[in-house]
Amino acid sequence: MLFEKLARRLGDGLRDATVAVWGLAFKAETDDVRESPALVLVEQLLAAGARVRVQRSGGPRVRASVPGGSGDVRQECLRRRGRGSRARDSSTEWLEYRNPDFERIKRALTRPLIVDGRNLYDPQRMARLGFIYESIGRPVACVSS
């Protein structure tokens, strides 16, 4: 579902796009990535030709968890926040992701697109902050024109 949302928004631009994925652990405050839905998203993005930047919450298990460790997957610290990415995905409920510096994130993204697999943020607030925001089971929030 998250991949489809990103693919619909990025279209042909998904190939060679950099997508930041926050939180590979399936459960907040753990480093357990077994059966994490975020790993499925990473695999789908790589298969579509995207580059993936994952936040380090998954630790050293991350590369080993991506089948074959192939494709362009890099880990980065939270402080970098997906610099140069076209989109960002939230796939876990870690506390550090609950109230990030959205202005910094917006400056780091080449397109202000956030796909939130955990419904962490308020859609209206995200629209007011200038993001295209898609979550699960809620209306899409976009910047007013």
Image (tube, rainbow, N blue to C red):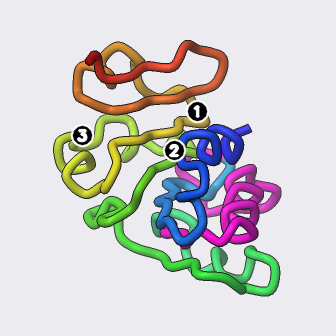
- Report the front residue among 128 and 66: 128
Label 3: few (<14), some or many (≥20) within 10 Å?
A: some
Disc 1 versus disc 3: nearer the observer: 3
Q: Of label 2 and label 3, which has the lower sequence position?
A: 2
Instruction: Identify the disc placed on residue 90.
Output: 2
The spot of residue 15 in percent (x, y) is 60, 66
- In-front residue for pair 85/22: 85
Residue placed most toward the observer, 14 or 129:
14
> 5 or 126: which is nearer to us?
5
Quadrant hosting residue 66: bottom right
Left/right placement of residue 112 relative to residue 23 reads left
Q: At numbered mark 2, what does the secondary structure look like: helix, strand or loop?
A: strand
Q: Is residue 14 left or right of residue 104?
A: right
List the residue tagged with mark 1.
118
Please give the name of the residue rendered at 70% of the width and 65% of the height, measured from the top-left corner: 48
Q: Is 127 covered by the magenta stretch?
A: no
The amino acid on which the numbered mark 3 sits, given as a three-letter code, is: Phe
Rendered location of residue 3, percent (x, y): 69, 47
Image quarter in which the C terminus is found: top left
Which comes sooner in the sequence, label 1 or label 2?
Answer: 2
Q: Quadrant of the N terminus?
A: top right
Residues drawn in magenta: 27-53
Q: Residue furthest front?
A: 12
Q: Please name the amino acid that badge 2 sits on.
A: Ser
**Badge 2: few (under 14), some or many (20 or more) residues near its Cα, within 10 Å?**
many
**Residue type for callout 1:** Arg
Task: Give the residue at mark 3.
Answer: 102
Asked if disc 2 and disc 3 are in contact, CB closer than 8 Å, the reply is no
